[in-house]
Image (cartoon, rainbow, N blue to C red):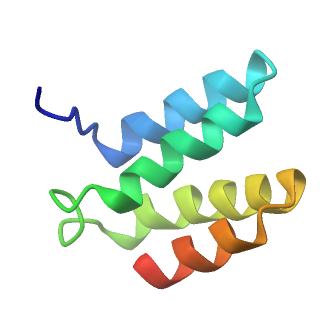
Amino acid sequence: MARYGQRPENALKRANEFIEVGKPARALDTLQEVFRNKKWAYNWSESVLEPIMFKYLDLCVELKKVTYCKGGSVSV
């Protein structure tokens, strides 16, 4: 089965929805999938990437996932 890759803007909306219902770990996974998906890797503008990175780093700090924080920063 093919993996579903969502647009970065939609992933940010989805992550915010997970945070609202009290699932920050799932929100972090959603944002991490954006960085793993190579389809959009070279098509990002700074205006799209910046809010995603801020949210990703906030969640990493909140959940104390230092290795995720480092890995996400490097993959961008």
Pick whichever, 21 or 1, lies toward us.
1
Q: From the viewer's perspective, is 54 left or right of 35?
A: right
Instruction: Kindly identify the residue that appears in the image at 22 percent across and 32 percent down.
Output: 4
Up/down of 17 relative to 64, above or below? above
Pick whichever, 29 or 42, lies toward us.
29
Q: Quadrant of residue 27?
A: top right
Q: From the viewer's perspective, is 61 left or right of 5?
A: right
Q: Quadrant of the C terminus?
A: bottom left
Up/down of 60 relative to 7, above or below? below
Farthest-out residue, bottom:
74
Q: From the viewer's perspective, is 40 left or right of 17?
A: left
Pick whichever, 58 or 46, lies toward us.
58
Instruction: Kindly identify the residue that appears in the image at 64 percent across and 66 percent down.
Output: 68
Q: Quadrant of residue 21?
A: top right
Q: Can residue 76 be seen in this snapshot?
A: no
So how many labels did they put on this image?
0
Q: Can residue 62 be seen in this snapshot?
A: yes
Up/down of 17 relative to 37, above or below? above
Up/down of 41 relative to 62, above or below? below
State the image coordinates of residue 16 (x, y, percent, origin top left): 64, 31
Q: Quadrant of the N terminus?
A: top left
State the image coordinates of residue 2 (x, y, percent, origin top left): 11, 32
Pick whichever, 5 or 49, lies toward us.
5
Instruction: Kindly identify the residue that appears in the image at 78 percent across and 58 percent down.
Output: 58
State the image coordinates of residue 66 (x, y, percent, origin top left): 77, 72
Instruction: Kindly identify the residue that appears in the image at 39 percent across and 43 percent down.
Output: 9
Q: Quadrant of residue 46?
A: bottom left
